[in-house]
Image (tube, coloured by chain):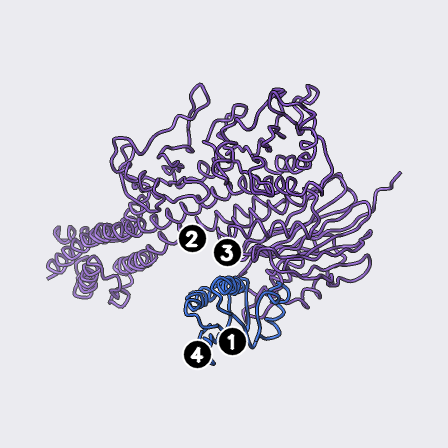
Amino acid sequence: MVIIAVSITMVSLLVLRTNTIDIGVQLGDSAANDSRQALEQAATEQLISMTYSLASMSDAELMLVQNSVQMIAFKASEIVQNPERYTPRPVALPDSVNAGVMTPQLLFAEGLNFDDIAPDAALMGNIQHLLMNIILNNVDATAAYVGTEQGFFIEVSEDSHLAPSHFDPRERPWYRSAVLSRDITWSDVFIDASSGSPGIASAMPFFDRSGNVAGVAGVGTLLDDLTEIVIGTRLGESGHNFILNEMGQIIIAEGISEDEHGNILREDLLHQENAELAMVARRMVDGESGIERIVMYESEVFIAFSPLETLPWSLAVVIEVEEVIAPALESQGRIIDMTDDALTEINIVITVVSIIFVAILFGIIPIISYWSRRFSLRLTNPITELQEGVHDIADGNLDYPIAELDIYTGDEIEDLGLSVCKMTSSLKEYIDNLQKVTAERERIGAELDVATNIQASMLPSIFPPFPDRKEFDIYATMIPAKEVGGDFYDFFLVGEDKLAVVMADVSGKGVPAALFMVIAKTLIKNNAQNGLPPKDVLETVNDILCENNDAAMFVTVFIAVLDIPTGKLTYANAGHNPPLLKRAGGDYEWLPTKRGFVIAGMEGMKYKQEEIELSEGDELYLYTDGVTEAMNPAKELFSDPYLLEVANKYKDENLKEFLGNIKKEIDIFADGAEQADDITMLVLEIKKKEKVG
Amino acid sequence: MTIEKKVENGKTVLLLNGRLDTTTAPELQEMLIPEFDGGKDLLLDFTELVYVSSAGLRVLLLGEKTAKATGVEQSLKGVSDEIMEIFEMTGFADILSFE
């Protein structure tokens, strides 16, 4: 009787053991399969979204170059068409004194008489300031220039070498192709001789009053930022990206090399043996976007591609399939690990039962009489039940109610039952979460990180920004929302005596908003540094942004320029929240602003500008609607009146504490509600003026 | 947000109810823009609308641009003080038409 009970128990345990191992293997296999599919799908989506983001970022970089050349062409045509508005500003001829100095230079074609071109060249000299600013503000710009039909050429280049005395712009290929196309044109990518980086030049004609070409504006740029986007943003270990030109040649990628003439050695993807790859290259050249699974350089890869808008180029993102599905294999391993704990318990019980079995065989009677009770049905039952349960689980029924079985025997059997319970519930949880974990985790990250990085990298973040300027102090913060909103602030000196501050908010969210922000911010800075007053900055930037804005994005902007010696503040507002102003010793109050329409919305908008005098101890606080429209769980807004109250509560703190405390008050108000929009603030304090004389 | 569409005095009326924000603005855009092909003037009834975010303003701007391009008129009515304040601040008050 006892022998039978022990034998049944033994057999049940052995079956239980086999079934538990089966759980590990079978569930492991099916989970690996499921998660492989989930991962492949997630990877596909992620690749498509990342490719699109990278292509948009590349476009934004090229658009900055395009905008610079447009600005020069606009200005040049204005000079040519309205000469009466300008006073002559002669440009220096090349001089060995200026070698290595960044300065405008005038060159002209051989055979021309200097005196003949001097008056027109001096008039066009009004452009030299803009040329200088373009080089100063765009880290990658190496040269900005204007060539004219009369045959003279005004240039600012980053490292002025002693230029040849004669130079005919009209003979240059960039000049000819711009004249021919009557529109913006781009050169081939070349390797810049002095830096060894890939570069590109862009040119655009400008016209006289009768619509004839009067000359061509041009900008030369290194493609460092573009290269960084393409090479620096990689997916996983095996991921890499490249840009293909309209001929199907790789022009930007890691490890691109050049021949002895500085020409890039281009891999031609259109004409090579790998038919699958050639087909993808064909679709890229045709401006399609998509994703394919092909064999490339002997590995199976996913390749996603998306066209650029500024140039007939296409960007591709490549990653090995094996790397994409690696986490699926990891899941398989984890499931087998989870069943191992239960197996250990089973093995212990098997050992105990085996010892008893041996004891019985050797006729150790006293033990039998004690164990016979425990080894009767009471013992056999739970094990048989467990065995059936585990069999069900192995078939995939993770909801089998193990915990409800009669397993609470107070000995090893209970331990065994509980460990099977634990295994089942952790397996269930793991498998339930598997799809979510693998699919969501990765996808969300990519797009948002890209936008957050763009935004963060564009904002000045070192304080104090101008340590040797004692006449004012500035502090600013931007806390991005989970989905970036496109807020930005900026501040910069205009010459020695003026300080510009900008607070702005791009409509929309994510990568498109971040890219629009990059362009808007650069244009505002370029124009303000060009000496334009706030009203003209808004009008000029508005018209440029309206040109290519099918998405109807817009930007609200508050811009102010402080004349440091006099304290005069000139400001204009394009649909932005009105700032708060605190006079020394007083309270914060709304700064009266004449409001204008947002920029980039409609062409030809006019803006009004106003002036006030600031003196020592005055503070100006700028912010975006992320502050006033912060919401609590009841969907109430932080609101203008509350902001005013809070600002006055902390008005005497130093600038950093002031902004920090406002943010704390917003957090308290939000009471755990998710931050829906970027929260951006800037505060400017007028300090003691340096004694003059 | 809910959008109810009806025709009144020869105009297509879209009655908006709720909040016009990042989540709901695409709905309005999808419904509004094709209406300009119909040739009937459009009236956006804001009486039951409580909030307009910048995403909402974008759709109104898109509507205004499409109106200019197609010659169909877009106008608003029943705008609350709170929303009017947003229109004033952003300058939209100057480019939108109000009934």
Q: Chain of mark 3?
A: A
Q: Number of callouts in the render?
A: 4
Which sits in the foreground, A420 or A495? A495
Q: Badges 2 and 4: C-beta atoms under 8 Å apart?
A: no
Query: Mark 3 or mark 2, which is nearer the start of the sequence?
Result: 2
| Residue on which the image places disc 3 | A509
> In the rendered image, what is the letter of the chain coloured blue?
B
How many residues crowd mark 3 within 10 Å: few (<14), some (14–19), many (20+)?
A: many
Quarter assignment of residue A135: top right
Check the image and name the residue furthest to the front: A210
Q: Position of residue B3 (x, y in %)?
A: 44, 74
On the same chain, marks 2 and 3? The answer is yes
Q: Position of residue A629 (x, y in %)?
A: 59, 64
In the rendered structure, which amino acid carries the disc numbered 1?
Asp
| Residue on which the image places disc 2 | A444
| Residue on which the image places disc 4 | B7
Foreground: disc 3 or disc 4: 4
Q: Position of residue A158 (x, y in %)?
A: 61, 29
The Cα–Cα distance between marks 2 and 4, rounded to whole angstroms, is 42 Å
Q: Chain of mark 4?
A: B
Q: Which mark is residue B45?
A: 1
Foreground: disc 2 or disc 4: 4
Which sits in the foreground, A675 or A76? A76
Local SS, label 3: loop
Foreground: disc 2 or disc 3: 3
Query: Is residue A147 among the parts visible in the rendering?
Result: no
Q: Badges 3 and 4: C-beta atoms under 8 Å apart?
A: no
Which sits in the foreground, A131 or A5? A131
Q: Chain of mark 2?
A: A
On the same chain, marks 1 and 3? The answer is no
Q: Residue at x 75, y 49 (%)?
A: A562
How many residues crowd mark 1 within 10 Å: few (<14), some (14–19), many (20+)?
A: many
